[in-house]
Amino acid sequence: MKAEKVLIVDDDDLMREFLKETIERAGMETIAVPSGQKALEVVKKQTVDLIITDMQMPRMSGLDLIKKVKETSPKTLIVVITAFGSIDNAVEAMAAGAFHYLLKPFTPDALEAIIQKANEQYKLIKENDYLKESIGESETQVVGNSPVIKEILETVDRVAQSNASVFIHGESGTGKEIIAHTIHQKSVRSEHPFIKVNCAAIPETLIESEFFGHEKGSFTGATARRLGRFELANQGSLLLDEISEIPPPLQAKLLPVTQEKEFERVGVKKPIKVAVPLISTSNRDIDELVSKKIMREDLFYRLNVVPIYIPPLRERIEDIQPLCESFIQTLCATNNRKIKTLTPEALEKLENYLWPGNVRELQNIIERAIVSMDPLDLQIKANDLYITTSKLPEPTPQERQLLRGMTLNELEKKLIVETLHTHGKNAEEAARSLGITETILKSKLREYDLDA
């Protein structure tokens, strides 16, 4: 990841040509203008990553240009060129927001060294922008004693040493994202970014831009260049969370990057190469989605090189106790409570519950108990756990007769229809009641040809 477009501002024709040749040899696109006024016109129309400007120019000085640019584009990197006698001006320019300065005369090597520093700063800025967007999305370690968790961790250790694509599937709340993050942490790429994109939470019209980025002016609202998640994840790892929620036409645009490791930003026909292993997740039956052509078969096979299935919590009861102990340690510290323990009766209550929300639900119940109980009490008792029932109710004879002979898809369709009816066809409320996202609900409505 480096600066791509450099704006050169100098009223000296020979200096402009020298700067242009040196920078283009470094593999960057240049725009060269003779004045500050022309530079401002360029900045208003398109994104530039780096500006190299002379200090002493007629009508508008380099210092004035810096101040004008920083008003509208504060993150644009600016390098000033100044004569030895104008070192005080260089210091003033740095105070106004310039990234660095060059003293005349200078060699091509000196200029290339400054460009390298600018590229390093540019990379830090872009990664920091992403991290600010993702703040609050914390990770934790994989916890569990069950044979299946131990087997998953062995697979994680093996796959982390490769560049193979990984497909993690399982119900919502089972810990798919934590497994993905563990793969990254154990890989040789751990010093580089771990970038994720929640495919279920992005509007269809913005998915391509989120993946591949866009150029300034490429569509309404594109007021500046934006790097996509693939570019941000270069040399690191990219998590495509709930990949099955991407509409098939957009899935086709993922094919080149999964195979050729290159893509084009929205609004520019210039291939960008990346080195980034893909980790994908889904909480749906992928085989069924592929058979119904909701997910492209060719894309699935490219992403499913190493499959990892995480069973629901109700199928690995032995993991409940170590998970609770880990949550109690973390959540007591977070909520300023003394460390507590579970009574045997409380643990039994947790182990008898069916956990439709899996590990995420368990964490929420433990946290609710910790913040709701007496802070001086050091034991979490059964009545501190807000669980309404531990077993599914037995169906009535009429319900058994109704359900007999129905396929799983028919049951799911019936549940969706009844839930929508209960909530007056309010998709948001119905999705919340079903424990899925609104995007997933709408996808299922299309799958079953139902009206919202």
Image: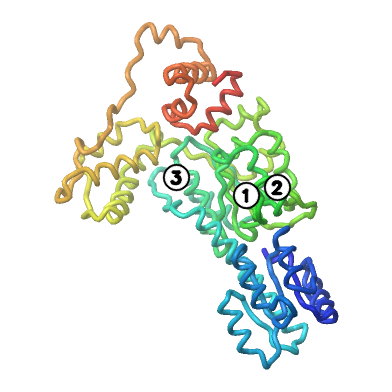
Q: Residue furthest left?
A: 376
Which residue bears the numbered disc 2?
258
Q: Earlier in the sequence, mark 1 or mark 3?
A: 3
> How far is the residue under mark 2 from the one under mark 3?
28 Å
Q: Amino acid at mark 3?
A: Ile
Q: Which mark is residue 374?
A: none
- Which residue is at 64% across, 52% downward? 228
> What is the image's colouring?
rainbow
Marks 1/3 in contact by CB < 8 Å: the verdict is no
Marks 2/3 in contact by CB < 8 Å: the verdict is no
Q: Which mark is residue 278?
A: 1
Q: Quadrant of the C terminus?
A: top right
Tell me if 29 is positioned left or right of 352 in this view. Answer: right
Tell me if 238 is positioned left or right of 360 in this view. Answer: right
Assess disc 3: are there few (<14), some (14-19) or many (≥20) residues with their C-alpha within 10 Å of its C-alpha: some
In the displayed structure, would residue 93 be above or below residue 330?
Answer: below
Q: Earlier in the sequence, mark 2 or mark 3?
A: 3
**Quadrant of the rendered structure where residue 205 is?**
top right
Q: Amino acid at mark 2?
A: Thr
Marks 2/1 in contact by CB < 8 Å: the verdict is yes
Residue 102 rendering spot, x and y as whole percentages: 69, 84
Q: Quadrant of the N terminus?
A: bottom right
